[in-house]
């Protein structure tokens, strides 16, 4: 439960707002629209902007530009930031990797995955993806079904072993566990904590007035930097947990906004 009445609520995406790389459920979409009526909302996750559009934006109904102006989108773990302009989404910043950093990241994660036996021959789409500001390894491919992804690394041991080994090879970069089968590589120090700090700077909303909801707040997860930053956090295991939490939170914020 939230410790205060946040002015901004930030969310991870996969397994927090929706099943991995899937559209948000109509129940969640309706809750997000309600939340936008009483608070600023941020989605900060490892996916790229097109994924945010497919999973979230395209599923929000009866939402005008004034409401969407309260929605902050931070793809690739906060290494990019988008705000709603006049009828379209505009990129505010992007902390892109250099060509050298990208190549070293791609080589290190592929070599390590092969060495550990985690490089799968049968996948759904590419295993490696250059997202500009982030290199992402997805063990079963970018379009793998949720059921297969859930079974690949039930206890998270594979991702942890891969992350630690790749981080040792790339001391100048940041390596974090991402979704259920993914590992994300960004510039050093450019993680979700960086994104939240930039959000506070650009919106004028201090971190103490923010709340973060995520499913990977464990020490090896890519939500963990937000917890270390000192932002109030709510841990969930799936989107249904998040929906239940919002159904309790939104009425308290509605009362405050009317007061």
Image (cartoon, rainbow, N blue to C red):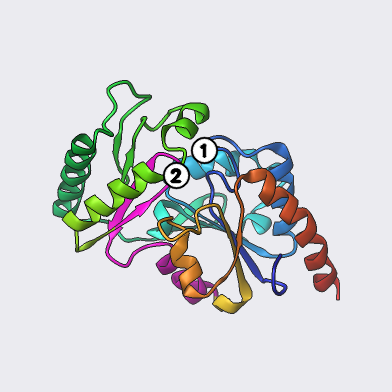
Rate crowding at label 2 as few (under 14), some (14 to 19) or many (20 or more) other CA atoms within 10 Å.
many
Q: Secondary structure at mark 1?
A: loop
Which callout, 2 or 1, points at the residue further toward the start of the chain? 1
Residue at mark 2 = 179
Which region of the structure is painted magenta? Answer: 175-203
The image position of residue 76, as x and y in percent, is 40, 52
User: Can residue 216 be seen by looking at this rendering?
Assistant: yes
The image position of residue 34, as x and y in percent, is 75, 54
Query: Is residue 176 magenta-colored?
Result: yes
**Residue at figure coordinates x 51%, y 30% from the top left:** 146
Q: Specify whether 89 is left or right of 121.
A: right
The disc label shown at residue 20, or none: 1
**Residue at figure coordinates x 37%, y 59% from the top left:** 79
Question: Disc 2, disc 1: CB below 8 Å?
Answer: yes
Q: Is residue 219 above or below residue 155?
A: below
Rate crowding at label 1 as few (under 14), some (14 to 19) or many (20 or more) other CA atoms within 10 Å.
many
Query: Is residue 183 magenta-colored?
Result: yes
């Amino acid at each position: 439960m939230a410790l205060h009445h946040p002015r901004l609520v930030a969310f991870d995406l996969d397994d927090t707002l929706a099943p991995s790389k899937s559209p948000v459920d109509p129940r969640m979409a309706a809750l997000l629209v309600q939340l936008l009526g009483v608070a600023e909302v941020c989605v900060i996750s490892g996916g790229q902007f097109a994924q945010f559009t497919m999973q979230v934006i395209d599923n929000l109904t009866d939402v005008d530009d004034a409401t969407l102006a309260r929605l902050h989108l931070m793809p690739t773990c906060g290494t990019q930031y988008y705000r709603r302009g006049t009828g379209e989404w505009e990129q505010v910043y992007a902390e892109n990797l250099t060509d050298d950093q990208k190549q070293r990241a791609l080589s290190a994660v592929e070599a390590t995955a092969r060495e550990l036996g985690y490089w799968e021959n049968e996948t759904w789409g590419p295993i490696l993806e250059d997202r500009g500001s982030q290199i992402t390894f997805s063990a079963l491919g970018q379009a793998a079904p949720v059921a297969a992804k859930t079974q690949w690394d039930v206890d998270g041991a594979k991702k942890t072993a891969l992350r630690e080994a790749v981080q040792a090879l790339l001391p100048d970069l940041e390596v974090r566990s991402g979704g259920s089968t993914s590992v994300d590589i960004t510039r050093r120090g450019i993680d979700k904590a960086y994104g939240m700090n930039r959000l506070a700077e650009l919106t004028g909303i201090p971190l103490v007035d923010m709340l973060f909801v995520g499913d990977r707040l464990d020490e090896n997860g890519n939500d963990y930097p937000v917890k270390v930053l000192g932002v109030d956090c709510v841990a969930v295991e799936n989107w249904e947990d998040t929906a239940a939490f919002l159904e309790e939170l939104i009425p308290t914020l509605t009362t405050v906004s009317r007061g």
